[in-house]
Structure formats: C-alpha cells, structure tokens
Amino acid sequence: MSSETSRRKNDHIRICSEKPVEARNVKPGFGDVHLIHRCLPEVNPDELDLSTEFLGFEFKAPIVISAMTGGTSKAAEINANLAKAAEEHGIGMCLGSGRAFLEKPSLAYSFKVARENAPSIFISANIGFQELFRYSWSSLRRLVESIGADALTVHLNPLQELLQYEGAPRFRGILERLRRLIEDSEVPVIVKETGSGISMEDARLLSSIGVDAIEVAGAGGTSWASVEYYRSLEAGEAEKARLAETFWDWGIPTVSSIIEVRSITDAPLIASGGVRSGLDVAKALVLGADLAGLALPLLKPAMESWRDVSAVLGRICEELRLAMVLTGSKTISELKEKPYILTGFTRDWVKSRGLKVRCKI
Ligand SMILES: Cc1cc2nc3c(=O)[nH]c(=O)nc-3n(C[C@H](O)[C@H](O)[C@H](O)COP(=O)(O)O)c2cc1C
C-alpha cells in the first residue's frame, strides 16, 4: 500500500476512536419519528422473527456493519472481530475501502480475515468513487473474489475529498463510470455516502443506471468533515482545518435522506449515519429502509474483542425486539407497515421538498 493510503487509514482509526467525531448541531432525525404504542400488542417476545432478506441473502436481523477499514495489521484485527460478531448474530458486514488492496495485493489478508471469521454471512467489498477512474471491473473483480465478497459497495464522499489537505478531487464523469461498473459487475453494486446523505435527485440518477442497492449514510452520525478537521490541524494546515470546521454538520440528515430516496425508488435500501439503537433501526424500517447500518459505535469494541462487538449488537437486537413487541409486530415485514408520525425539523423538510410519505403531514 502506498504510505499515504496507509497513513490515512491509521489516522481514521485513531481519530475516530479518540476524538469527538460525531455531528454537533445536526441530528440524524430519529427523534422526529414516533411509532405508535400498542398496549394490546398480541405478540409474545419469544414469537418474534427478526429475519429478513436483502439482495437475495438471508439476514437473522435487519442490521449491517457499515464500512470501516482494511489495509493495516490493526485493521485486520478490527475486521476479524467485526466479522466474528456479525457471524454470531447472522447479520451483514461491509469492509472498508479496498484501495489498499488494489495498490498492494499483499495486504489482502487484512480484508480476507472477514470471510475467514464469517463463512456464512453477507459481506460486501468497498471502494471509493476515485477508484472508478483507475480500475475497471476486471481489476475490481480480483478484490471481490479474493475477499470472497457477495457485493461491491462504492462510496461517494465529495465533502471529505474536498477537505482532505492532500486531496485533488475529480467529480465529473462518476455517474458514467458507475454505470459501466454496474453493467460489467457480476455481483450486486451498492452505492453509499459516508455521512452526508443521498438526495432524491441523486437517487433518481442512481436508479437510472440500475444501481442494485443504496446506503444513505446521512448526516447526524460520524462527520467526515470533523475527521479531516483533526487531520488538517495535526498537519499544521490551519486554513483547511477552518474550512472543515465550517462544514462539520453538512449534509442531509439520515431520516430525511431515507425519505428522499424512498420517495423515488423501491431499490433495496440501507439506513445509516447516526443509527445508535435498536429503536433507531425500527424507525428506519418503518420509514422504508430494508436494513440499518452502524459504524462508529462498533469501532472501539472491535479494537478490543469480538465479544465486545457482539455485546453492542446484542443490545441493538434487544432494543429492536422491544420496539417490535410494543408496535405489535411479529415480523420485520409487519413492522415495516406500522403507522408513524413525523414531527419537527423532519416534517418541515418533507413538506418543503414535497416528499411522499406513508403518514399524513
Ligand atoms: C473509522 C471509520 C472508517 C470508515 N471508513 C469507511 C470506508 O473505508 N468506506 C466507506 O464507505 N465508509 C467508511 N466509513 C463510513 C461509514 O461506513 C458510515 O457510512 C458512516 O460512518 C456513518 O455511520 P455511523 O454514524 O454509524 O458511523 C468509515 C467510518 C468510520 C467510523
């Protein structure tokens, strides 16, 4: 791996595990979503079925570990712990950017550990959109195959690219590259953001090129402007740091982004960005998501042990179970049909954007 990619990967892990990197003034919006309590739930906790299907793969719960890392020995340890816990819970996992692998194939071990520790779950490989300018499907196939991945996720992170003090971003032509990748790829292609959300305008473009699934990664959780803020400060790049601080809370809040995307496409949808409880997961599903994804809450546990990751996932599943009983939902498909109310900022957003929702506003 180039020393630059390696340094960046280590910076991300260190900064995200040591500094306050979450949004400051923007919330993901789950507080604006209210599920309707049922005092006659008519469902016993032991009857619940949390299983669901996503892109033809079975999940024991509607949860996925969002992309984080790969390419260093620390990353290998983190990926092994994430994968082992994901396997125990029967949920999915997306690996961190495979750029390190593409630059230096000897680093494959730090990604392969996932499949070695999780033989049966859904695993996605991950690349950044910049890789689309450098690699065609024939190179990316090596990444997917050697990891034993079931899908390829491409992340779009224009904000982070603009703020990286060492970056030289290029955005023109991405959609066409994505279209070619989707056409050539033998595995499903998922497109995700990294914390600024996806609008209905972009969801429409992604639908037009036949994307297989979308992960919103909206604002309100991990802020990549904040990560670049700390990196620029450490590099003595005061002006870049100031720029990053201005955009700390930039983006479409997660709940608004779920509604934006769902209002124009039925494509499989992952809700992520500030998902912090099983109740958030339940609300995301009621709004139309098929899975919910978490990254930051699992990072520190994954630096300790797979049991620590498993404990967090266990808590999330328990909270989801409670939300299911309290809304009278025996299955995930029943939960998805439950009524809800939207208030506050999200209600204003939905009205201003003229978005379609299931509830009355
Ligand atoms: C340490 C760390 C590394 C990340 N690296 C990647 C990455 O390589 N590729 C990617 O698509 N997203 C990456 N992300 C973004 C997450 O997948 C996710 O979209 C975002 O953090 C929002 O979720 P959260 O609020 O639960 O953290 C990373 C997140 C964290 C915390």
Image: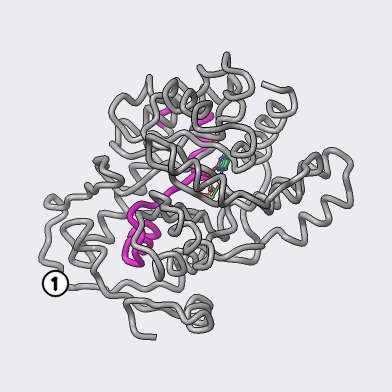
Identify which residue is drawn at 35% across, 54% down. 268
- Report the quarter where the N terminus lies: top right
Query: Compared to 185, does 175 lie above or below?
Result: below
Query: Is 315 left, or right, of 298 in this rendering?
Result: left
Display coloring: one colour
> Which residue matches tag 1?
40
Task: Name the main secondary structure of what is drawn in magenta.
Answer: helix
Label 1 amino acid?
Answer: Leu
Give coordinates of residue 297: x percent, y percent.
50, 45
Identify which residue is drawn at 53% across, 26% down. 139
Q: Taking the image as drawn, is residue 186 in sight?
A: yes
Q: Nearer the viewer, residue 134 or 213?
A: 134
Query: Compared to 171, does 151 lie above or below?
Result: above
Q: Magenta span covers which residues? A: 279-307
Bin the neighbour count of mark 1 within 10 Å (Cα to Cα): few under 14, some 14-19, many 20 and up.
Answer: few
Indicate which quadrant contains ligand 1. Answer: top right
Query: Compared to 226, does 104 lie above or below?
Result: above
* Circle 1 SS class: loop
Residue 35 placement: quadrant = bottom left
Residue 243 placement: quadrant = bottom right
Residue 308 placement: quadrant = top left
How many numbered badges does the structure rendering display?
A: 1
Identify which residue is drawn at 55% across, 33% down. 136
Give coordinates of residue 339: x percent, y percent.
27, 75
- Magenta run includes residue 292: yes
Give coordinates of residue 240: x percent, y percent.
84, 50
Query: Compared to 359, does 124 lie above or below?
Result: above
- Report the quarter where the C terminus lies: bottom left
